């Protein structure tokens, strides 16, 4: 085997591990560029991927450094054997994943599900392969259960491979993926690499998933486009969706600085604005949205945990005010709630469905766009990687 290039990668922790200061270091390099910053080192491999979108994935085309991807012999979540030859003729997006993870890996699962939607018919020519990084839970039932729980149970092109602990360790070593184990607590810290492998088994590009992967729509779109770009020329085409990476002031994509808003409060006569000077979480919701209502308790928990460091604002979109007040009162919601009666702010932010969460940095730039619900674990992980720790 051709020696692999040395490369330093960030690593991620399972949700059950508390790592003080670790998450902030983990993805400091993964933040989207702000207006006026230097151009990212990563470059697109095809015209269908902009430089800003490539930066979102920290996409690193290998060019002449491309090498044959290491081999493996695993069993997927369906109990079927998988090897690199299983995917001959398809592009492969390969990652390492903890089958007990409830935070960052679950964001990757959402990215894969949305990437599949963007791929459309091309999905049959792309394989999303993940290798179990958790030797404490190596059973096929473990990877199968995780896949079902995180929306990939019926994805025909999702393969979550596992094996005995020694085999899993050998595969991670072959790919150069760092994995740290805590035997006392049976928890795992692992690398965030994304390997883009062409139909002949050659590694053609490297990327990373991390905090930016919570920006599901642009991250998934770019991941899907990169996979398609590695197919033979006759099979390449633009995938659906949009990267929505907009670095121009006034836009609402990742890296943009949206125009500030001022909305009436849901309760009382005050107004709610997004000019806090802190990281700000904007959660767009409505009382008629079941997933939104189910998310309220988790948002309240995170709001309390990050009090004084993060401003969380709930934006009730085109909803009955009485129903919204009753819903939040029952949920015990105490963070600021605003009324977007005619959906003007939701429209300005290009909110495609509810719930939808946007995170702004202290200067008002968008760092995360996340359609769908956040669990407390996911949002805590993302904020821990963005927000400086509390000082005593």
Image: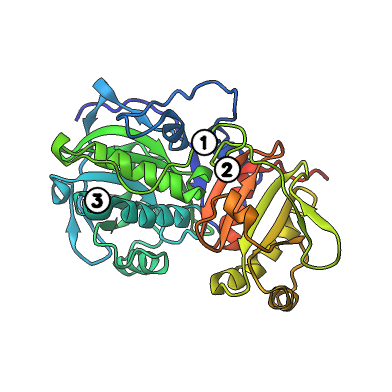
The picture places residue 386, in percent across and down from the top left corner, at 63, 42
Quarter of the C terminus within the rendering:
top right
State which tag comes first along the sequence, 1 or 2: 1
Q: Which mark is residue 252?
A: 2
Mark 1 and mark 3: Cα distance apart in space: 29 Å
Badge 3 density bin: few <14, some 14–19, many ≥20, Cα 10 Å: many
Which residue position is annotated with label 1? 246
Which residue position is annotated with label 3? 127
**Left or right: 319 as drawn, with respect to 277:** left
State which tag comes first along the sequence, 2 or 3: 3
Q: Secondary structure at mark 2?
A: loop
The picture places residue 142, in percent across and down from the top left corner, at 36, 67
Q: Is residue 17 visible?
A: no
State which tag comes first along the sequence, 1 or 3: 3
The picture places residue 116, in percent across and down from the top left corner, at 31, 55
**Left or right: 44 as drawn, with respect to 287:** left
Q: Which mark is residue 328?
A: none
């Amino acid at each position: 085997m051709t020696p692999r290039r040395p490369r330093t990668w960030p690593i991620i922790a399972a949700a059950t591990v508390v790592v003080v200061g670790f998450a902030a270091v983990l993805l400091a390099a993964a933040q989207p560029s702000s207006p006026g910053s230097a151009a990212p080192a990563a470059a697109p491999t095809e015209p269908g991927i902009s430089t800003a979108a490539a930066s979102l994935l920290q996409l690193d085309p290998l060019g002449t450094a491309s090498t044959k991807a290491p081999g493996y012999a695993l069993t997927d979540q369906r109990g079927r054997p998988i090897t690199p030859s299983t995917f001959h003729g398809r592009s492969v997006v390969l990652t390492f994943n903890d089958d007990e993870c409830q935070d960052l890996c679950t964001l990757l699962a959402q990215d894969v599900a949305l990437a599949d939607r963007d791929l459309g018919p091309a999905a049959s020519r792309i394989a999303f392969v993940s290798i179990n990084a958790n030797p404490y839970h190596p059973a096929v039932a473990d990877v199968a259960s995780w896949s079902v729980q995180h929306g990939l149970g019926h994805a025909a092109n999702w393969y979550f491979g596992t094996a005995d602990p020694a085999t899993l360790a050998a595969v991670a070593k072959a790919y150069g993926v760092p994995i740290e184990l805590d035997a006392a607590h049976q928890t795992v810290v692992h690398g965030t690499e994304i390997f883009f492998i062409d139909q002949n088994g050659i590694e053609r590009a490297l990327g990373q998933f991390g905090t930016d992967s919570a920006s599901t729509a642009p991250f998934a779109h770019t991941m899907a486009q990169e996979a398609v770009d590695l197919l033979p020329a006759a099979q390449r085409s633009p995938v659906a969706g949009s990267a929505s990476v907009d670095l121009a002031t006034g836009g609402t994509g990742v890296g943009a600085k949206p125009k500030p808003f001022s909305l009436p409060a849901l309760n009382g006569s005050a107004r709610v604005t997004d000019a806090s000077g802190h990281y700000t979480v904007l959660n767009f919701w409505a009382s008629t949205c079941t997933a939104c209502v189910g998310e309220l308790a988790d948002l309240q928990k995170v709001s309390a945990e990050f009090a004084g460091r993060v401003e969380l604002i709930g934006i009730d979109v085109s909803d009955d005010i009485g129903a919204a007040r009753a819903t939040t009162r029952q949920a015990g919601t105490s963070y600021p709630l605003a009324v977007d009666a005619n959906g003007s702010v939701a429209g300005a932010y290009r909110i495609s469905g509810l719930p939808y969460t946007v995170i702004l940095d202290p200067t008002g730039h968008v760092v995360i766009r996340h359609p769908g619900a956040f669990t407390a674990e996911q949002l805590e992980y993302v904020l821990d990687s963005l927000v400086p720790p509390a000082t005593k």
